Image: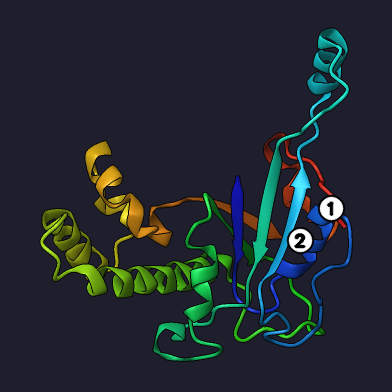
Amino acid sequence: MKVGIVGLPNVGKSTLFNALLKRQQALVANYPFATIEPNVGVVEVPDERLKKLSEISNSGRIVPATVEFVDIAGLVAGAASGAGLGNKFLTHIRECDVILQVLRDFSDSEIVKEGSVNPEEDFKVIEMELILKDLETVSRVREGKEKKVVVDKLFEGLNDGKSAREILSTEEERELAGDLFLLTAKKQLKVFNVSEGDPRLKEDGGEDLYIC
């Protein structure tokens, strides 16, 4: 499995990346765009069953499943039009299976943040930039006759601000659009970066999860 980590600048993407890898591979700094080139790391998935299976089968070799994480530069509103570092670096996560979006949900005057802390609005900003990147992809292939019906449907829907997940309503459509590697067609996981001891962590049976 391959997971792409996205988010606005200074939300904790590289901190999460380093924590998942359990080493300081990515630069963590209190200024926008500390990450320019993508950071890539592979983590083995712990599975106690493998050891038992190895003992049963007398196999001396254990090959665990792995997850590859890709940490890219921060996106900003208007990236599709060239703001910040633009959006070209999104190509590094086109072939990811899952997009993990990190959202800042804590207040700290010492950590640079443009505007107020509002994870819901931040999510909309990132989602729109991913939609615009997909629109760019679809626009390039729209003139081809193959898959024209699906591509035209995507073009219209993306222009309306919808994600590919919302537009592609059948399994057949999803299969036809598969080789376009659309970002908004991928499964997404939201990670909220909150303050240590945030009382909301105890709501609805939740618990603190310290990763770093």
Tag 2 and tag 1, C-beta contact below 8 Å? yes
Amino acid at the residue labelled 2: Leu
Q: Which class describes the residues within 10 Å of circle 1: few (<14), some (14-19), or many (20+)? A: few
Spot occupied by residue 81 in the image (x, y as percentages of width and height) = 39, 89
Helix, strand or loop for disc 2: helix
When asked about the image quadrant of residue 197, the answer is bottom right
- Figure check: 194 above or below 26: above
- Figure check: 80 above or below 140: below
**What is the number of the mark on residue 211?**
1
Query: Which residue corresponds to the image point at 73% horizontal and 39% vertical from the top-left?
Result: 206
Give whichever of 207, 53 is nearer the camera. 53
Query: Which residue corresponds to the image point at 88% horizontal and 67% vertical from the top-left?
Result: 24
Q: Quadrant of the C terminus?
A: bottom right
Query: Which residue corresponds to the image point at 47% horizontal and 83% vertical from the top-left?
Result: 77
Spot occupied by residue 61 in the image (x, y as percentages of width and height) = 84, 27
Give whichever of 110, 3 is nearer the camera. 3
Spot occupied by residue 83 in the image (x, y as percentages of width and height) = 49, 91
Amino acid at the residue labelled 1: Ile
Instruction: From the image, tell me which residue sits under label 2.
Output: 16
Spot occupied by residue 172 in the image (x, y as percentages of width and height) = 23, 39
